[in-house]
Amino acid sequence: MPPTTDTATKPSAAPERSLIQRMDALGKANEVRTQRAKVKRELKARRLKIHDLLANPPACIESAKVFDMLLAVPKYGRVKVQKVLGVCRISPSKTIGGLSERQREELVKLLRK
């Protein structure tokens, strides 16, 4: 006889949050997006070097995809970014904070050339 399942006691995916908690989370997310957009503009204007950014990433880009940040660099399009990530054996969905030390060092070394 299969076990019975009671849907009333099934745990939810995320805990319930109050309106204040949701608004705080939304405010923090908007702030991170604003800071990330500023970093991308700095990269595009060449006032910031991508290898410096990857070597010492600020907290606002820890959760950003490496692929997206490389796309902000002048002369780096989708094809070139895919090649660079392939050479360094980095998944396009990898975040900057999720890079291993080997991946980070290899990527920084390649981008400094």
Image (tube, rainbow, N blue to C red):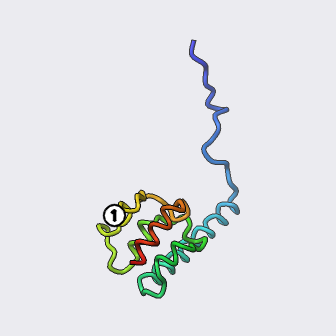
Relative side of 77 to 46, left or right: left
Q: Residue at x 65, y 61 (%)?
A: 22
Relative side of 113 to 47, left or right: left
* Other-residue count near label 1 (Cα within 10 Å), few / some / many at <14 / 14–19 / ≥20: some
Residue 28: x, y in percent? 63, 69
Q: Residue furthest left?
A: 79
43, 101: nearer the viewer: 101
Determine the image quadrant of residue 89.
bottom left
| 73 is higher (above) or lower (below) than 88 | below
Residue 63: x, y in percent? 54, 64
| 2 is higher (above) or lower (below) than 18 | above
Residue 49: x, y in percent? 47, 81
Residue 75: x, y in percent? 32, 79
Q: Is residue 31 visible?
A: no
Q: Amino acid at mark 1?
A: Gln
Total numbered labels placed on residues in the image? 1
Relative side of 8 to 98, left or right: right
Q: Residue at x 31, y 72 (%)?
A: 77
Q: Quadrant of the C terminus?
A: bottom left
Determine the image quadrant of residue 72.
bottom left
Relative side of 92 to 25, left or right: left
Which residue corresponds to mark 1?
82
Q: Residue at x 54, y 62 (%)?
A: 101
